[in-house]
Amino acid sequence: MNLHESFCRWLMEDGKSPKTVESYGNDVKQFQLYLEVKASNESEPLSRFSFVRYKQALLDGNFKPSTINKKINSLKVYNDFLFSHNHVKETFIQLKRDRVQIASGSERMVQALNDKEVERVLFYIQDESKVSIRNRLIVYFLLYTAVRVSELVGIKLNDMDLLRQTLMIRGKGGKVREISLRRDLIDLMQLYRQGERQETKYQDSDYLFVSQRSQKMHRDAVRRWLALISEDIGIKLHPHLFRRTCATLLLKRGVPIVTVSKILGHHSVDMTSSMYIQTSRQDKQDALDLL
């Protein structure tokens, strides 16, 4: 078993999710390919010198700071693995020192639908000749609960408490959070369960969203359908766009960021602040016009 395989197994044994293992593994594999091409004479699997050279190569390649920092984080975990298994003699990557610094005050513009675009999407999905009840319900969940697409397709019938109008979501790392459901979303879900869903051969599935071929809808099917209707609506749609939209609109409507952070399932308010607070040119102009 090579180091890459051993590293991935170590992550799985540590309880990391399959997606996390895949992400870390890909970042380490890219670093290993860099060593083979650019530093073939490097004898150690990771060294301070090879890491600094690799980081500079990423900077020279004009990768986004967030992308570089993700790769640095993966290599830090890889460094920990190598050290714990006596493949290197020290841990020489420190996130506080080595992460790419973003200038204080820099704004990260979040792509999100504005109010008029949301209205356009909602108007389109009301057309029963174009959109099934199930697919309309998918948009309602994505827009009104801010769930990730992986969380969406994983919703089970017993995750919902209709009396309390709540939904339990199992998110990244096995974290569980409770989300309140709008009345119109619940009504549409009941319509789906009593109608279209009953017409499939998977009506007894534990999962809410089923297809004609599977008792659990695949997230790629959601992505493909949104891409398909994008041309009709005139907006490039994808699942995460609705999550961004929900968070952005909640914040712009004055919902406390702590509440929005909990809805999103973030581990800290700082993450919500850095990723979802958006100030557009129009917002700034409207503010200055008040003077």
Image (cartoon, grey):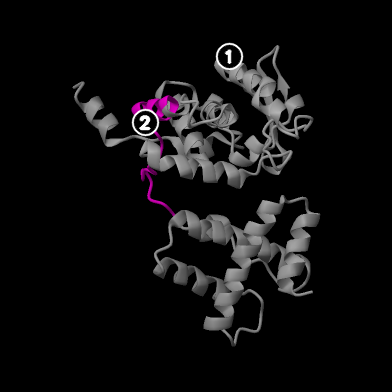
Left or right: where 180 falls relative to 103: right
Q: Residue tagged by mark 1?
A: 183
Q: Which of marks 1 and 2 is nearer the N terminus?
A: 2
Q: Quadrant of residue 214?
A: top right
Kind of residue sitting beneath label 2 = Glu
Residue at the spot x=77%, y=50% of the render?
15
Which is more toward the observer, 30 or 53?
A: 30
Q: What stretch is highlighted in magenta?
A: 101-123
- Location of the C terminus by quadrant is top left
Kind of residue sitting beneath label 1 = Arg
Helix, strand or loop: magenta stretch: loop
- Location of the N terminus by quadrant is bottom right
Would you call the spot at circle 1 few (<14 residues within 10 Å), some (14-19), or many (20 or more)?
Answer: few
User: In this picture, is 147 found above or below 162?
Assistant: below
Measured as percent of width and height from the top left, residue 286 is found at: 24, 26
Measured as percent of width and height from the top left, residue 109 is found at: 37, 42
Residue at the spot x=47%, y=21% of the render?
255
**Residue 111 drawn in magenta:** yes
Q: Are marks 1 and 2 in contact (CB under 8 Å)?
A: no
Spatial CA distance of label 1 from label 2 is 22 Å
Residue at the spot x=69%, y=57% of the render?
21
Secondary structure, mark 2, is: helix
Which is more toward the observer, 122 or 110?
A: 122
Which mark is on residue 117?
A: 2
Query: Can residue 83 be seen in the rendering of this structure?
Result: no
Q: Quadrant of residue 88?
A: bottom right
Would you call the spot at circle 2 few (<14 residues within 10 Å), some (14-19), or many (20 or more)?
Answer: some
Measured as percent of width and height from the top left, residue 274 is found at: 46, 40
Left or right: where 230 falls relative to 290: right
